[in-house]
Image (cartoon, helix red, strand yellow):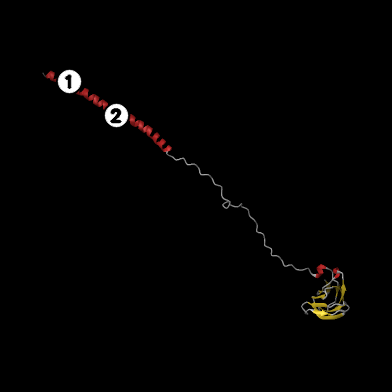
Amino acid sequence: MRLRGSIAMLGVICSSLTIDLPAVAIPQAEQKSVLTSLSQIVTVAPHNSYISQTTQIPQVSPAPVQPPLPEQQQPPNTQVSPTPQVSPSPIQPPLPEQQQPPSTTVLLNQGKVSIKLINQTGAKITYQAIGNTAPRSLPGKSDVTLKNLVTPTTVTFKREDGGLLNATGRSPTPGVLELMLDATTDLGIDKQSLQIQPTGDVFLN
């Protein structure tokens, strides 16, 4: 009886082991399958993530380069020296001695001279000692003396009828100049003024 009971007990144990083995084996197989799937996921996931990331990067085309506008362009680095500003000098007429040689020379009396105007024409002559007298009239065939004019001095004269005058000067005595005024038709020798410099040089123009 004991032997049978032991055999029966052994059979129950064996049968229980037989039944438990497949139950244990199935979870192990599933575990291997799960591990395999996980390894594939682990292996593929970064690749899929890389693909998804690269495909999601927007393609940005480079912006076209615009040339600078003319007002934005910088001028060339050139240094221009400033042009000096030269103020125009006043125009001064040349001195009589720079234009022509003196017509004659008079010996001055302490820097003064007396001028005798002799009108040899038949027309009136208007004359003036600049800075000394107002315009005056000298009848034809007459004369007048302007005394003690300080040099330099200028005397102007012209015929009232618009005719031409030929002037000739001479100094008969020191400190005196005689000026003969005669009619002419030659425009080249027409005279209208007398200038006496402090040196005694006499210029007719």
Where in the figure is residue 134, as x and y percent of width and height?
A: 77, 79
The residue shown at (82%, 69%) is 97
Residue 37 in view = yes
Q: Amino acid at mark 1?
A: Gly
Q: Amino acid at mark 2?
A: Gln
- Quadrant placement of the N terminus: top left
- Quadrant placement of the C terminus: bottom right
Cα separation between marks 1 and 2 = 31 Å
Q: Is residue 179 left or right of residue 47?
A: right
Q: Which mark is residue 186?
A: none
Q: Which mark is residue 11?
A: 1
Where in the figure is residue 50, as x and y percent of width and height?
A: 41, 36
Q: Nearer the viewer, mark 1 or mark 2?
A: 2
Q: Is residue 73 above or below residue 92?
A: above
How dense is the environment of label 2, judged by Cα within 10 Å: few (below 14), some, or many (20 and up)? few
Where in the figure is residue 66, as x and y percent of width and height?
A: 54, 47
Q: Is residue 84 left or right of residue 120?
A: left
Compare marks 1 and 2 and give the one earlier in the sequence.
1
Which structural element holds mark 1? Answer: helix
Which structural element holds mark 2? Answer: helix
Q: Considering depth in this image, is 180 or 120 the residue closer to the camera?
A: 120
Q: Is residue 41 above or below residue 73?
A: above
Name the residue furthest right.
172
Where in the figure is residue 184, as x and y percent of width and height?
A: 87, 72
The residue shown at (11%, 19%) is 2
Residue 176 in view = no
Q: Which mark is residue 31?
A: 2
